[in-house]
Every structure is written in structure tokens, then in C-alpha cells.
Amino acid sequence: MYSPQPIDLAWMTYLGIFSMQHRGQEAAGICVSDGERFHVEKDLGLVTQVFDERRLDSLRLANARVSIGHVRYSTTGSNLRFNAQPLTTRTNKGILGLVHNGNFVNAREVRDTMLMEGALFATTNDSEVMLNLIARESHMDLVQATAAAMQQLKGGYACVLMSRTQLIGFRDPNGVRPLVIGQRDGENGNVGAYVLASEPCALFAVGARLLRDVLPGELVWIDRDGLHSLMVHPGTPTPCAFEWIYFARVDSVIDGVDSHAARLRMGAQLAREQPVEADIVVPVPDSGMVAAIGYARESGIPFDYGLYKNPYAGRTFIAPTQEARELKVKMKLSPTAAVAGKRVILVDDSIVRGTTSRQIVNLLREAGATEVHFRVCSPPIKHPCYYGIDTAARKELVASTHSIEEIRELIGADTLSFISEQGLRDAVDGPGLCLACFNGEYPAGTPMVNDLDKLALEV
Amino acid sequence: MYSPQPIDLAWMTYLGIFSMQHRGQEAAGICVSDGERFHVEKDLGLVTQVFDERRLDSLRLANARVSIGHVRYSTTGSNLRFNAQPLTTRTNKGILGLVHNGNFVNAREVRDTMLMEGALFATTNDSEVMLNLIARESHMDLVQATAAAMQQLKGGYACVLMSRTQLIGFRDPNGVRPLVIGQRDGENGNVGAYVLASEPCALFAVGARLLRDVLPGELVWIDRDGLHSLMVHPGTPTPCAFEWIYFARVDSVIDGVDSHAARLRMGAQLAREQPVEADIVVPVPDSGMVAAIGYARESGIPFDYGLYKNPYAGRTFIAPTQEARELKVKMKLSPTAAVAGKRVILVDDSIVRGTTSRQIVNLLREAGATEVHFRVCSPPIKHPCYYGIDTAARKELVASTHSIEEIRELIGADTLSFISEQGLRDAVDGPGLCLACFNGEYPAGTPMVNDLDKLALEV
Amino acid sequence: MYSPQPIDLAWMTYLGIFSMQHRGQEAAGICVSDGERFHVEKDLGLVTQVFDERRLDSLRLANARVSIGHVRYSTTGSNLRFNAQPLTTRTNKGILGLVHNGNFVNAREVRDTMLMEGALFATTNDSEVMLNLIARESHMDLVQATAAAMQQLKGGYACVLMSRTQLIGFRDPNGVRPLVIGQRDGENGNVGAYVLASEPCALFAVGARLLRDVLPGELVWIDRDGLHSLMVHPGTPTPCAFEWIYFARVDSVIDGVDSHAARLRMGAQLAREQPVEADIVVPVPDSGMVAAIGYARESGIPFDYGLYKNPYAGRTFIAPTQEARELKVKMKLSPTAAVAGKRVILVDDSIVRGTTSRQIVNLLREAGATEVHFRVCSPPIKHPCYYGIDTAARKELVASTHSIEEIRELIGADTLSFISEQGLRDAVDGPGLCLACFNGEYPAGTPMVNDLDKLALEV
Amino acid sequence: MYSPQPIDLAWMTYLGIFSMQHRGQEAAGICVSDGERFHVEKDLGLVTQVFDERRLDSLRLANARVSIGHVRYSTTGSNLRFNAQPLTTRTNKGILGLVHNGNFVNAREVRDTMLMEGALFATTNDSEVMLNLIARESHMDLVQATAAAMQQLKGGYACVLMSRTQLIGFRDPNGVRPLVIGQRDGENGNVGAYVLASEPCALFAVGARLLRDVLPGELVWIDRDGLHSLMVHPGTPTPCAFEWIYFARVDSVIDGVDSHAARLRMGAQLAREQPVEADIVVPVPDSGMVAAIGYARESGIPFDYGLYKNPYAGRTFIAPTQEARELKVKMKLSPTAAVAGKRVILVDDSIVRGTTSRQIVNLLREAGATEVHFRVCSPPIKHPCYYGIDTAARKELVASTHSIEEIRELIGADTLSFISEQGLRDAVDGPGLCLACFNGEYPAGTPMVNDLDKLALEV
């Protein structure tokens, strides 16, 4: 955030990252500057675990002007404490803080070159590569140097950078990862604070309204003179389809497309593409909820709450043995009486490994479902994501090695269908889409080293 | 749990209380005995906060035979650490551990009498009164003494007591609070372990099947000879209506009534009693979910997911100022695009103070809802609960001082209706019900001191 | 403490128990009352670990009047959290808090009788037996009931009891364990606060001066009318010799005997009883320090600092293997260059198991000491202590199974001598002494069950 | 440490830094490599607070070969977590870990130059400057590059650097800060592990014997071929006098001078230079202990233990008000009965601000000392230290603004004398000495910016 007037930026940034907790649960951090001091607090854990009153207070600088915050979702760089963001460093452009979402596919090559030139890398975080590139342009000002750095890094990313007096946001040329601009109403005739965030919910959390999306390839900066824009690298917009399928909150509008409406349309599309006779439509909560409503409406088959989700199950649950790990799904999802004796259409957002899907089908059958028809709001995932969706966890993609019929058999469903690529495009009904994980066409490049694990620095 | 064969009772009990986390978030505890040792671990916090691997391991006695567990929901007795359950104590019947759910309405009088006789009370927990009553009957065996103690304490309660060799469960004469019996399949021809729990989900969590409910006024005990029963004090069954309205999990069957089906019927009943023209039916998640589906089906008005619930919002969120406390609702619930330009029927389980309801209505209006029709699955709450539902939190009951029309105005809804008492009875469609909080008729007695706060011991 | 005027009793009590940290490192606790409320905070750990600012603040009642504090040194009752003191309970005399030092030798018989009468025992702490005895006298006032309870419990103990309005201290008839009375200067013509403590250092820590010792068998109480005394059970004074040998701080005066002077005399006595030709006198720090000075002065052999003690070594040091446990002594004590090529007289307070002594002698030899003459300020310890010195840790008393010559050989010293019983009496030069651990004559009775472990309650 | 054979380097390094806890209490860290992986654990706190079993285990690589450890004592760079050492980073010479003791006086100029060249500085730690200098020499191997970096940094320092396969130690040209080399006996005919440490006690802690000191200006490295040496920058040896006065353990031998013997000589020297008639010689424990023995022997006046030091007082003690901060000295030091009615010679290592000295004199007088003669083992401290002794804490040096007579009056002593510079040189009786804090002659240069605070980076 950038506020021309002193407001409680620590608290506001806390609200903002809290509202985006769904985007990353591994670590959280906030950096605040009052034009002189730079204070950062970050640690492993959820926002509410990292920040207690005392720690938040330590960030409450009297004349706070600029701040950034982050919740970490591990992709490259393991979950060590020193990888928590914001990353802060002193450069020839003063102290800088950077947060980023997504991945640079050529980070390793760039880093290796800079290593040979004498650079140090303390973390295994992509952000450090970006900061080194910025610092290297010692003759340019911060905005110019950032634009120059953008030209050298490829991939799908959205970043927010702060100095003592500026807030800078930029998005990759394809706009794979989202970034929105918001503004609070100013008080007493003053200009209100500007906010940059991955999703609009963070804007609303701090009382700001959505101005617009940062455009693919655009760099925006905010200083005492207001909001400025520079189109650094115009490209074809191909935002990540998974934002609407699963990642973004259901109350978010990204690149002009409303997430709730898109999911309703996905469900309806599925119902048209893959109809089946059944008694009830049941969502896998919470991600399949809205698509299931869409399916139910289009098909005329009643929607029902057939799977209870234990709201406490996301927490660190002790599960010592293999059997116990199976139990984890059972502790999280539990069939209600709705499914007994019913032919069930089960709607989920995606199938990755298939193991959870198999357990859910099994739970429904044990609870008396006579048929289970599995409907998926995304096409089969066959390829890794290089732009920031956790492919480490999605490594053993069942659809890359099995046919749909084989998957159906594996998970024990009576029928199994996925939405078509075109159906998904129609349902999102917005800009072009990155569908690389479905079709292998990577709009923003691929890493030279294909094995993502090798990207990690071992320190 | 009681297991004739050595099984991992610590782990099983952990699973059981984890599955009942929704019944209490203040403290958690487990006690295990192997026939010789008695080991208890308990603390303030959620199950996953209280128990890490190390602490659970300390409970893993090699030949564990008997165990009890508890999650605490504060009613009488403040949330100090020493009030966490199980309560353990040495008596003339050996070491005993006790967990209870509910309240004894005459605990204070009984305690005062025993104080005069020289008894000590270290906690402000009702359980300690029960244990003193049991210990006083030094000439009786444990089962007899427990039955004698039941005769002297009034109120709505369900308790589980363990000695080194017995597991004892009992329920008040009206069966206000639930208690079910389950059993695991025995292996190798052995008798399987018995389980007592408030809700069937805890049975399923440990792989047991539901045998039956403990009857109102019944005492059951399990020892090496199996399950035994004693009808101590038969009474008219009047289980708490709130179990089906809100408290029990939607996948629970209590006293023969399925919670999911009952909530569907509540929604349908509301639709019949209080129809209104509108565009969509929206639940207040998660408690209004199933009733909203019932309302939608009965009325033919489409169900939609109009309010997003942030799954991280239940955690300890820092909210320093009054304004920030309002923000808490906003950080927890967020309208989706479904409600813009729509006439919304909003379905919730109950209205207590009305403040949250007001904020939700306001959120919907800000998101563009043109009308908001508030429908409530319970009658207006006008009276405190003396049987264990948190009346401390329900102290300023808006319905006890305001007419329905006044409440409607207060919360800003276009219309407001509650289900009728008879409609609720029909929807639950089971045994008699305790509806004391709605109509002031207390089936299990009231405390002499009406002010519940005075029940608390100040230590 | 009892203060007629409001002072910061929480803070004062914190200072008091901090100054007595050497008397117990297992747990710490403080209880404060303002005449209405009773607030207690206690936990396992050192005073500075248990009490942070927030926790101390929670004890800062505005009109605090009475307080007690405790540091726990485990004797009977294992080191579980629920055994931390002060123990608080509601009785027919109101809420009471109790701290005690020492042991009741007939606690088990008394407890068993009360169990049969219907009493509960939540802890395995002797204090709870005392509180039950007090509560049982429901017709007496608190002072009378406490005096009656004193008559029934035997052993070596000093206790401080608080109600909302009184502070009561009492000491066993033999005065085995110490208890002193102090008073702060009153401000503005008011009476100053009274303090009861095990050692005078706690009085000085809170700015009080020493008034006198509580007499053996005396009960004193302080209320708004000042200090009162009742001689409940006069006996022959036989305070524990170990207070002067080791336990009490070197700046303490107990029962009229100055600890520093007594230790100087012990050293001198040893030099007279057990002279030996040598080059330097070296203390085992810190407990042998003053006696070594006494030995050096009497013998004319130079004192030197031959063993460095690592001040951080008392902390929880990880020592996984047997070899590593040996390392613990090495990490704690390290010979200086003073001992190389010297004949060393090593002065220590006592020999318990002999294992540490052996390692110290070995360290000195490795550092080049040509002879090591071990001199001990106490006679050989042959019998367990039933009055509160940790006999659990002193279980395998080497002197109970080995002759002095055998011990000498075991520890590898050139010569080994202990002070004589009469020499010790002369050195302390005060009242009669309890020398039970040396000669087996127990002035305050022995437990019926000799095995102290059996005193513990297994909960 | 470097071990050609696999040994438990994590545990050994833990022992080593534990034995040097007296050199820094702010933070602790260990880094271990097995030739492939590099694992570091570090945090704020004492060694025993930072390392629990689990954390130490995480460092236990099966084939550990190289390790470094550190305890932090804050000089430049505030006590933030990211300043904890070892600092690890990836460079063109592979991953490196560095620990250092002391200060580089031209770190700021060097850093500013490198900033302009595009370098990043994540910490405010001198080590990062050294690592950048090493990385910049991309054409040299690690040993050459380190030697080149040594040539560019001035000040008083001792560093240990590790790569996956090498352990490198180096010391500034004046040898201001100490560094010793040790070696363990090899087992089964193998070469034993090499150890580099600030003091010999760390060698003994891991079972190694002292080989020799690293020479001033020397760089040594250890790899699979053994120990190698390179004299990078020979200079006049002027080790820091404070190592013998106060900093080093009394059992350490540094640059050939035994600390215990040196302190005895300082005390004797003081007695010769500054005799006074008195009854006893009392040390300020623990640092004045051995010098007081020396003074007593030389003067013939009896040594006595006149001040008790509470061994728990170093811990985090809550001291909210000014009055309470005075109490801190009182809680730490307490006069024994030895001083009553006596003329006392008090021996301390140094006087910095004079406030503690004043309180100690006052304590002695209150305890009845009739005269207090203050004798100090170092000359008056008038100048800041730029080579790593905490001048932040020594900022308000009383001797830089007051005459000795004024200080005497300030602290309330009857007489006050300091050892002479020549007396100190004679007592240490070894190499030349850095006496800059006494006489302002800085052998290893001074910073361009005199205000050390300005050296700190504000992140």
C-alpha cells in the first residue's frame, strides 16, 4: 500500500494478507516504511500465527507511508524460514522490499550468470534474482531499473516492490498471475491510499474499491504524485485458468471475469457436455460448491449437501501411519444422510493424483450411494505448471499416465467426465487463457532445466 | 473408550475428540489408563494445538484399556487452565477421571453443603461436585455411588467416568444432552472396543458403529464382562432442540433423528410458514446451508452461494478497536456476485444478539441485493439456557426485549420470520424437545440462583 | 506478604521468590488477593521462565493485600504441572492458598483416612492433605483449624497459608525447615507490610528487615491488626544441618547462625581435624568456596581458584549418551592453570553418590595436580532425608554401602576425610541440629512406609 | 571443525559453542556440511535455548565433514534475527558459511563501493561484506580470494569460513582477536579432526588438544590433505588486553599467556602499585576473583568471599521501573557477613560507566563495611573499542569525562586506584598489547565515520 497521509498501514496490510490467506499458508510477512525506517516481520505459519499484537505493534510506524505484505505458497525454494517474504535488501537505490507471486522460468540461468560476476545469493527465492537485476542497473532510477529487470526475466509472475518512497507493481507480459489496483477514499479532501493486491478481496478488506487490473506487461508505480503507468512489455493476455477453477476466492473478479459466475457456467457447461441420470448433485466442499449449483440448475437434478467438511481439518493434524493418512480424508470429509440410496453426481474442481478422489467415492458408497458420477470442472491435468501453481505437489499427475477410463476405474466412480478445453474457455468467457497444464502449450516459456527440483538452492 | 484388547487408545481418543472439535474450542484433554497408571494431558486450545506428537506419545501406554477425552465449551466456570477436562482425582474408589457436557442446575447448593462438611473444591468445574458426591458414598461400589450421585444432581448433562478398569456413561433423566454408544469390530474373534460419545461422528472416526443412544436417565458401564445398563431415573425425553438446529454436525443422528434430514425439513417448513417472492435463497454458511436447500426446494426459488465464508476466519484474529470488531464479520463473510440485483432470501439457524445479522444484511445490500428476506430456523430465543448452551454469550438476547418487527428494523431486513415452535417440533419429528430457550419451560429444573455468573468460583 | 496498604504485591513476591531460586528450580508460582479476588499463576520452570511481563501483570490487583509465592524443589510428588504451588482451593473458610517446604511423614496415613471418609485428592502434593485437615474443622476459625491440623501432621515443614484477609505461617515443632519474619518500613506513618520467607534474602529483596525466626512449633498470623503468635506445639529445636552446609545462601542468617561464618568455621574445623601437607586449597565452586577459605586460613596453605565453573552450565544442556553425561561435569567445571604441578586440597560440601567427585578428581589430575586431598564439610551421608531434602536424587548414597577408604579409592583421591559430627555441631555453634542423614536419628518421626516412592500418587 | 572421518560434528560444534557461551549471549548458530548438503540452524538466544534435541538432530548429517558455530555478542549490527551467524550464501565458489568475531573498521566504505557496483546487502553484518569481497574475485580459488579479501578489510577480527570441503581460518594482521587451532586424536590410525576456535576451552570441550594460535595475519585452511598455512599480511602482534582482564575464561591460554596466571599477576601488581591498609580483600564475582586472590597473597591481607553472586541473576529478569533497575544489581550481588565491621579492599576487572560500581560500594557500606578501597585491574577506559568489544554498551565511559578523584567520589569509595598501563603490560607479560581503549592508540586503524551507530544498516 502507499498512503500519502499517515494511516495504520501495518494493520491494513495485516487485513489484506489475512483476506488472501487462501493463496498461501506456509509463511506470512509484512514490511512497512515511514520514509526513513524499514521494518519487516515475517515467519513460517498462518497470518494469525505469525502476527500477534506485539509483533503487529512493532510494525506500527507513526508516519507509515509504504507497505507490502505476503502469504507464501511454496513452489520453488523450500519452506525454510529465510525464504519467507517480503525479501528486504539494501541496494544502490536504497533499501528495497519485494514480494512476488509466480515463477521466473529463467531465474536459474540469470542467477548463474550473476554468480560468476560475483553476486551472492542468500536465499533460494526468485525475488533475490529480481533484486540483483535491479541493483545491477546502478545508473538507472528504480522504475527504469525495474523495467529493465522485467525484460530479462521470463515466466508467469506478479510482483510488488517498495522503496522508502515508492510502491511499484508489475505483471508478466502474459498476465499469467493476477494483480489489481485499488484505492481508498481520501479523508478531508486528501487523496486516498493506493493498494496493489493479487485479488480484489484484499482491496475490500482495507476499505478500498477496485480501480482496474494491472495489465499484462505493465509496470505501475505510486508515489507522492499519484499513480503512474509504463507498458514495459505488451504481450498476449493468457491468465491462468486455475484462478477461476480453484485458486481465486469465489467473490473475486479477475481480469474482468467474476469467479462465482464463471464457476456456475463451468457447472452448467459440464451438465450440457456430460449429462447423466441421477438423484442429486453433490459438491466436494468447498471448491466444487458453486459449480455443483451450476450443474444442478442446468440439469434440473436437485443440489444437496452430501459431504460435510470439518472446518478444523485443515490444521496440523497428527497422522503417524499410512492408515492414519487415509484417515485424514475421513476426518476432513464426511457423508451426510443425503446420499443414502441415491444416485450421486459429484462435482469437484480438478483431479491431481486421484487418491483423494478415490477416498471420497469410497466414502459415498459406504454411506449408501448407489451410483457415483464424478464430474470435474477442469480438463485432465497432464503437464507441470512452471508459473507458480504447486507442481511439486502435483508431480504424480494421474492424467499424464492414465486414460480417463483408467482413472475412472482407479477412483471407483461409475462414470467420470472432465470439462472440455473449449468448454472451459467458454465458461470463463474472458481473455485468452493459459491452459498449459492441460495441453502443454506454455505461453510464457519453459525452464531450461525441466526438473523443477534442480531450481532449488540447497542452503 | 474401553478396549478389552490393547489398542492405541490415546490415538483413537484423539481422533474422537478431533471429530467433535465443533462442540468446544476452548480446551482439550485426554486421560488414559492401562489398569495401573493414569495419565492425563490437557490444556487450553484446539485439539491440534494441545496435542503434538510428543504429548500424544506420552499418553500411549502399552496396555491401554480405558480412556476418556474432552473438548471444552465454556458455560459455567471460566476458561482457566485448571478447568480443562478430564478432571482426575484419587478417591476411596481409586483414581477416577470424569468428563461432562451440560450443566447441573443445583451444583452450587450441593457444593455449599459439602463445603460445610469439610470438602475442598480446587476448580470451578461442575465435574468436581459430581466426583465429591461419588466419593462421599464410601460404602458403595463405583457404579452404585455414581447412580446415587445422579439422584442428587439436577440439570441437563451427559457424563463419562473412568476408573482403572471401568468406563461409565450416564445421561440426565430428560436426555437433554446427547450420548451414544458404539463398538468397534473385534479382531481375531475378540470383543471389539466400546465407545461412548456425544455424537456418532466420534464413533465413525475410530472405526466403530453406532449401537444405540444412552437412554435418558440411564447409566451404562463397560468392564471386562462387556456392556451393562441400569435405568437410574427414567424421565420424559426432552432432548435439546438446538442439537438439530445448530450444534450437532450435519452428518449426526441423535436420538434417532438425522440432522441433515431435520434441517431440510426446517427449511421446507419455513418456506411453507413464511413464503416470500424472491430470486435466490442464500444460506448463512455453514450453519444455514442445509435449511436453505430445504427452503429452496420447497419454494422452487433457486439456491445460490451468496456468501463466501473465509475458512481461516475462525482463528485468533487481532481486532483492536470497535471498528475492527465490525471488520471481523467482514473478514469472515463476503458476498459473492450471486446477490447483485437480486431479491435474496437469507436462511440462518438463529438470531441471538442481532448484531451479526445486521452486518450480514448490510453486506448483502452493499453487494447490490435489492431485497433481503431473513428466515430463521429457530423460534425467537427469549430465555437463557441452564443446560449447557453458552448463555454467557447469549446474555443480551435481542428477542427477549424486542418484538419481531423491532428486530427486523434493527437488522435492516425487508422481512423477518422465525419458524414456529410447532413447525420446529414437526421438522425434528422425533422425541419431545426441550424448547426452554424459546418458551421458558425448563424440563430439568432451574438454578436457585438465577444469575449464572454467581455460580462461578473466583479462584 | 501481607500489606495493610496497597503495594505492588505481585512484583514484590516475584522479587522474593527470585531471590530464593536456589531453593527450587522445578516450578514457580504466585497467588495474590485483594480481599475479594484470588489470582494464581504457576507453571513448571524457573521464576524468569514462568513469569513474563504479561503474566506478572495479570497478578497486579489494584488493592492487593495478601500474597504468597513458591519455588518448587521436588521431593514427594513428581514434577507434574498440577503439583506446582501455591495450591488454591475453596473451603468452608473461604478460598485458601498454601505453600509449603519440607515433608509430612504421616501424610499418607492421614490422606488414606480422609479418602475413606469421602475426600478427593486432585494432586500428589502434601499441601492438599494439610488443606483437607483445615477444611475438616468446619466449626473452627481458620487460625484454630490450622493449629489443629498442625497437631495431626508430623515431619519437618514450614508453611505459609493465605486467605483473602490473613497471612499465616507455621513451622514444625523441631523447626527442621526454616521460616523467618520480616517487615518493611511503613510510609506516611502507616504500618509496613509483613513478609514470611524461608530465608532472609527474600526479606531484603523486598526492602524488609529481619524481625525474627518463626519458632519451632509456632504459628504466626498477620491481619489488619498486625502480627499475632500462637505456640501450638513446642519441641526441641533441631534445624536441618544442611541449611548451613549447602542449602541456604551464604548471605543468610537462620536461627541466629550466620551461614558465611558457619562455613568458614567448618573449613577451619576440617583443617584442624584433617590436616595434610599440600600446596593449595581449592574449592568446588560455588558450594565449597567459603569453607575452602576457612581451611586455607586455618592451615596457612594458599587458597586458589583451581576450578572454573561455567555459569551457563546449569541450564538444560542436551546430553544424549552416557559418554555425554560424563561430559556434563566437564562442561560445568574446568581446572585452571593453578593446579598444574600442585598438591591440591579440594574442599566440597558433601559426597552423595561419589560420581561427580570422581570426575572432579580426575579433571584435576589431568590438569597436572600431583596429589588430590578431598575434604568434605559434612559427615558421610548414610540415611535418607524424610524432611524435604531430595532423597530421590540421593537414593544411592555411596556412604551407606562403602567405607571411607572404599570411597577414597572409588573417587581416586590421595586422601579423603569428612568433618566429624561433633566438629559440624561446633562449627554451626547454634541450636541443636537434625543430623538424621548422617546418624539415622530422626527427631521428627519417620514414615510408616519407608519407601518414599510409594508416597506418590500416580495420577 | 573439519573431520576427515565422519563424526558427530553437530554435537561437537554444539559443545564447542556452549563452552564459549561467555563470549556472546545474544544468538547462536551452527552450520554443517557433508560435502553435498549445507544445513544451518540459528536463532536469537543462548545455545541451550536455540538448540533443542530436535533442532540439533536436524544438523546431524550422516557424513558430516565440515562445520562452524557461533555465539553472537552484538557490536555493529543490531540484534535482529537475520544478523545471527553463521551467515551462509551461494557464490561462484559454491555455498559458503562464515562466522566472525571482531570488527572491520572500513566495512562501510567497502560496502558502499560494492553497493554502487550492484551488490545487495541483506543483513547489517560485517560478514556479508567479507563474503562479497570473496565472491568478487571470481577468477581465484577460495583460499586466494579469501586472502585477497583480507588485504582489503582493516580492523581487529578472527574469522572461520567453510565451504563444502574446506575449513578456513584467518586473523587480522595485529592479532587483536584470538583464534586457536586444535586437533582430536584420530581413531584407528586415521588423522583426527581439526578445530578452530576463539579459546582453547572449545578445543577441550570436543576432546581436542591445543596445537597453536593462528598467527596475526595468517590464513590457515584444512582440507582432505590436512592443515595448510599462508602468511597473508604479517603485522606487529597487539592482541586485545581485555581478553586477559575479563573476556577470556580463566582456564584459557591465549597467545601463550595463561589467563589465570595473568590475573594473579594483575592483582599482585595492583597490591604493589596501590597498597592500602585493610582487613579483607573481596572480589567482585566472578570476574575479580583471581585478581583478588593475587592482591591478597601479595599484600598479606586475608581474601574473603564478601559478595554473593546469585547464579540465576543473568537471566531475563523483569525490571519495569528505574527503581527496579537499581534492584537488578541488588538481586545479583549480595554482601555476606564477612564485610561487617571490616575495612574492605574490593577488586574488580574494570569500571565502565561507574553506576554498578557505585551500587556495589553502597551495598558493602550498608552491610557494615567501615572502609571500601576500590582496586581495578585495568587502567581507566577513555576511548571506544573499534575492534569488537561492545562500545555501544560502553558509550558513556565515566573515565573519559571524569578524573579518578571524581570517579572515586561518584562511586563513594574511600580510595580508588587503577592498575598502570605498564603494570598491565608486565602482568600479561606476553606479546605487545592493544591498549587503545586506555590510551587511544589504535593499532589496526579507525573507521572513517567515528560514530559506530552510523555503521548500522537500518533494515
Image (cartoon, coloured by chain):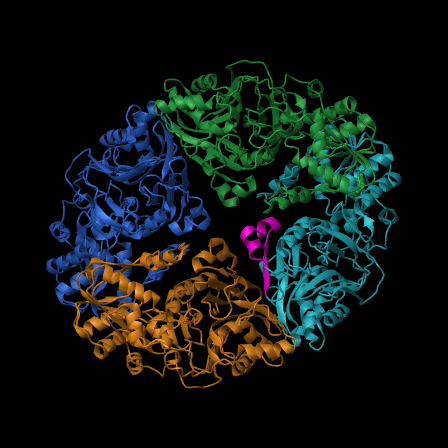
Chain colours: A orange, B blue, C green, D cyan
In this rendering, the answer to whether B457 lies above or below D112 is above
Q: Across the whole image, how many numbered discs are drawn on residues? A: 0
Answer whether residue A162 is visible to the viewer in this image.
Answer: no
Corner quadrant of residue A439: bottom left
* Rendering coords of residue B187 (x, y %): 30, 48
Q: Quadrant of the C terminus of chain C?
A: top left
Q: Which residues are magenta?
A: D37-61
Residue at 60%, 51% (x, y): give it: D45
Please indicate whether residue C142 sits to the left or right of residue D39 in the image.
Answer: left
Please indicate whether residue C214 sits to the left or right of residue D451 in the image.
Answer: left
In this rendering, the answer to whether D264 lies above or below D66 is above
Corner quadrant of residue D251: top right
In this rendering, the answer to whether B427 lies above or below B76 is below
Residue D43, magenta (yes or no): yes
The residue closer to the viewer here, C146 or A95, is C146
The residue closer to the viewer here, B21 or D169, is D169
Corner quadrant of residue B94: top left
Answer whether residue B175 is visible to the viewer in this image.
Answer: yes
* Rendering coords of residue D176 (x, y %): 78, 58
Please indicate whether residue A128 sits to the left or right of residue A286 in the image.
Answer: right
* Rendering coords of residue A41 (x, y %): 52, 61
* Rendering coords of residue B3 (x, y %): 32, 42
Residue A192, magenta (yes or no): no
Please indicate whether residue A20 sits to the left or right of residue C447 in the image.
Answer: left
The residue closer to the viewer here, B110 or B343, is B110
